[in-house]
Amino acid sequence: MIKREIRGEKMKITTIKTLKIDIVLIGYFLFLFILLICQTASADIGGAGGVIYYENGYTIHQFTEDGVFTPPAGVEEIAVLVVAGGGGGGGAIEGAGGGGGGGGIIYEPYFEVKKSVSVVVGDGGKGGKPGERGDKGESSSFDILNAYGGGGGGSTGFNEVEGSTGGSGGGGGSDKSAGGFTEGGKAVLGQGYDGGSGFRAGQSSNRSGGGGGGEYRGCSGDGGSGIVLVRYPIEPDFDY
């Protein structure tokens, strides 16, 4: 009789322990399930891609390198700014090389987007060696929006080369000799401005904004890298 009672108590204790373990396991899996739901909901609400910050009621995605933009749920229209890389400045043997042209710019205030979009950010062009034109900047793009890189600055000396075409054209070089200069490059329509022509005696009005500066008797500066910005209103119930 005593043995039966002891055996019964052991069975009760084992049953209670098993029940506690089951409750713990159920609670653990329930926690994982809720966590998964929260993560999925968060991914559906917020956009993704680039460096994200918030300013004056807007969410802004900043891309300084290639990436992918994913729009948040409920947002189908965004503002997009695409800036290409600037052109490198032109090198010179005598006189001054032309400044690189600024990268092309595209601004679309009402761009329709319903799915993830590839983003490309162009690097600036390399500055030219003595007597060589600077390299063009690389293009930047957001979906079908394509901004062209800035033109390279023109060179002077034994190898006189005009500024190249680009988002904004590269500036022409200036030679020390009387009347010695090269022409500026042409811009892509709607994305920038033509590069200025060089002047004799190394006057600096041949420098175009955004690219690398021209150099007097030497190698010149590289163009600046491009950037892509995306903006849309913050949802009223979106807690960031």
Image (spheres, helix red, strand yellow):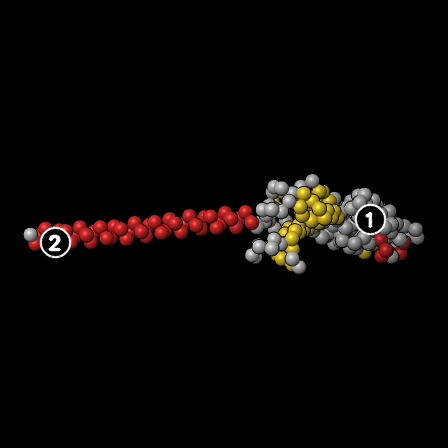
Q: Which mark is residue 6?
A: 2
Q: Residue lying furthest right in this view?
A: 178
Q: Inspect this view and state whether residue 166 appears.
A: yes
User: Mark 2 is on which residue type?
Assistant: Ile
Q: Quadrant of residue 52?
A: bottom right
Q: Mark 1 points at which residue?
A: 193
Q: How many other residues sit within 10 Å of disc 1, few (<14), some (14-19) or many (≥20)?
A: many
Q: Between label 2 and label 1, give the one nearer the viewer.
A: 2
Q: How crowded is mark 2: few (under 14 residues within 10 Å), some or many (20 or more)?
A: few
Q: Which residue lies furthest to the left in this view?
A: 1
Find out whether the residues at labels 2 and 1 contact each other: C-beta distance under 8 Å: no
Give coordinates of residue 180: x percent, y percent.
90, 50
Tell me where residue 200 appears, x and y as whole percent: 90, 54
**What kind of element bears circle 2?**
helix
163 relative to 19 in the view: left or right: right
Residue 40 higher or lower than 55, as above or below: above
Quadrant containing the C terminus is bottom right
Residue in the image at 61% along x and 41% along y: 115
Total count of labels = 2
